[in-house]
Image: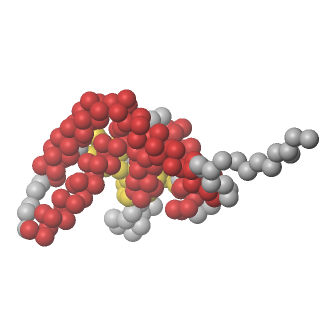
Amino acid sequence: MSATHDKAQRATVQIGPLSVDGFQMPDGSYRMSQTQAAECIGKPEINARRFLDSRGIKALRGEGYTPDSVAIESTDQSRGQSRVNALPLDVISAYWLWEASKGNQQAIALCYALMAETLERRFDAAFGVERSESERNAILAQRLQQTESALAILGETYAEPDLLRMENEQLRQQLRDAGLEPWSLPQTEDPRPDE
């Protein structure tokens, strides 16, 4: 990117079957709009804003984190949006993983497919295997489809016991943190003997 650009450059980025607008900042870093980050996992933009208010993102980015409002270069002469609320890729990754941990099946499929691709790219590099981006997108799209199908078959009926077990363990830990033992009987005073 040349030093004369003071606006983000826009390009279409393929993530398997998904197409999103990607932005390259003047410093060379990448961003994606918070609206599209939410849409990729079947959520409205308000869901991404709520994540940005969560304790998780504050731990990752610090208390005062807010998304960048990015000026973008227009691709044509028509009037249109010239600014976008943009999130760095690590924040988007944390958001998708957070949603996956809450049971969002689209987020689970997307995180799984992207993690598998990341590992595969490293193994390809180690073994000298070269693949085109279109091949990688086709593989990613296939992984997403297979995972979404498997999750649909699994369904929430089978996932519910796992979620309940995780929630139960979290509640037990909260009780322990509060100084209580979850399975012990409450302490009662000795009853008075009958007179």
Image position, residue 176 (x, y; %): 62, 56
Number of residue marks: 0
Colour treatment of the image? secondary structure
Q: Quadrant of the C terminus?
A: top right
Eyeballing the image, is 155 above or below 134?
Answer: above
Q: Quadrant of the N terminus?
A: bottom left
What residue appears at the point 28 percent right and 40 percent down from the top-left corner?
Answer: 18
The residue lying toward the viewer, choosing from 158 and 113, is 158
What residue appears at the point 18 percent right and 59 percent down from the top-left corner?
Answer: 120
Judged left or right of residue 179, residue 147 is left
The residue lying toward the viewer, choosing from 179 and 83, is 179
Q: Quadrant of residue 119?
A: bottom left
Q: Quadrant of residue 160?
A: top left
- Pick out the residue farthest to the right: 195
What residue appears at the point 45 percent right and 61 percent down from the top-left corner?
Answer: 6
Judged left or right of residue 10, residue 123 is left
